Amino acid sequence: MRPLAVAAALATLLGGARSAAAEPALPGTPAWAEGADVVEHLGQRLPLDLGFVDASGQRAQLRSLFDGVHPVLLVLAYYECPQLCSLVLDGAVGAMRALVAQGWKLGSQYRVATISFDATERIDQAARKQASVLAKLGSGTAEQWPFLVGDADSVRALTRRLGFEFLRDPATGALAHAAVVFVLTPEGVISRYLYGVEYPPRDLKLALLEASDGKTGSFGDRVLMRCFQYDPATRRYGLFVVRFMQLGGLLIFLIVLAGLCGFMRHERRRERMEHT
């Protein structure tokens, strides 16, 4: 085969490969679902003027979720999701129940809210999901854990600020999305993303402590927060060895200091006895 003919054949093959690679993935396929990703926007404030409606039909701006004191756990979930959203909510409920056993109660140390990212959903769907989730939690009221719906503009503005991408399958109407919850400061600033469908209670507590800058926990909680640090690689909180060693060194210093003080008191007492 002539060199020019070979080159033309190779160009044709490469062009065909590029065309195939450029073809968009079919809706409903795993490759298509991979487009529903999360881009973290840590440190950004949510648009607090966005309007939503709660499960009782009351209109509320996003700012109503924040009181300037308590950090907020935000769960995005669409209420007719066939599986993943329920797993995310169940994971949040499990972690919250574990926190109750540690003295962390909803409303006292933190707040929580769920917002549907499906703008077609209605308040009756929000009410049913809210009742189901609160029954699993075993505590809390509709006011303490509001479930909200919103129009397309509000939903899109919120999810874009959070960096939460989702895709709708035109054939089934199902939404492809990531499994993630958001921890926000008392002023509505994005503080931490927690991924998966199970959230270790320690991680949730540390994320909430971090979001509140340690203001909502006990002294012991604040010490715990200083010993652990979030690792973006594992997406978990791990023991901060340097800080732990610093605390250990401080403890040793205090023990030695106490020993020296005791020794000095003993010596002074002995000297007084010798002079009498």
Image (tube, rainbow, N blue to C red):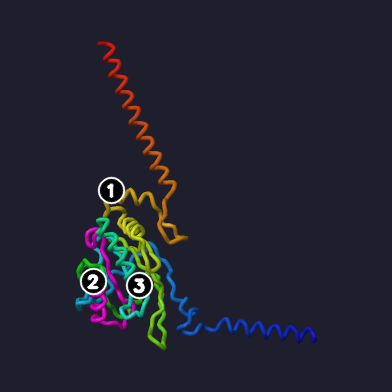
**Do we see residue 261 in this rendering?**
yes
Q: In this picture, which residue range is highlighted in magenta?
A: 105-132
In this figure, which residue is indicated by the disc labeled 3?
87
**Contact (CB < 8 A) between labels 3 and 1?**
no
Residue 190 screen position, x and y as percent: 35, 64
Residue 85 screen position, x and y as percent: 35, 75
Amino acid carrying label 2: it is Ala
Side of 137 where 19 appears, left or right? right
In this figure, which residue is indicated by the disc labeled 2?
135
Q: Residue furthest right?
A: 2
Residue 56 falls in which quadrant of the image? bottom left
The residue carrying pointer 1 sits among few (fewer than 14), some (14 to 19) or many (20 or more) residues within 10 Å by Cα, namely: few
Amino acid carrying label 3: it is Leu
SS label for mark 2: helix
Residue 124 screen position, x and y as percent: 23, 81
In this figure, which residue is indicated by the disc labeled 1?
219
SS label for mark 3: helix
Query: Up-down: is 130 above or below 254?
Result: below
Residue 110 falls in which quadrant of the image? bottom left
SS label for mark 1: helix
Residue 178 screen position, x and y as percent: 41, 73
- The residue shown at (29%, 67%) is 93
- The residue shown at (63%, 85%) is 16
Q: Label 2 to label 3, Cα distance in Å?
A: 15 Å
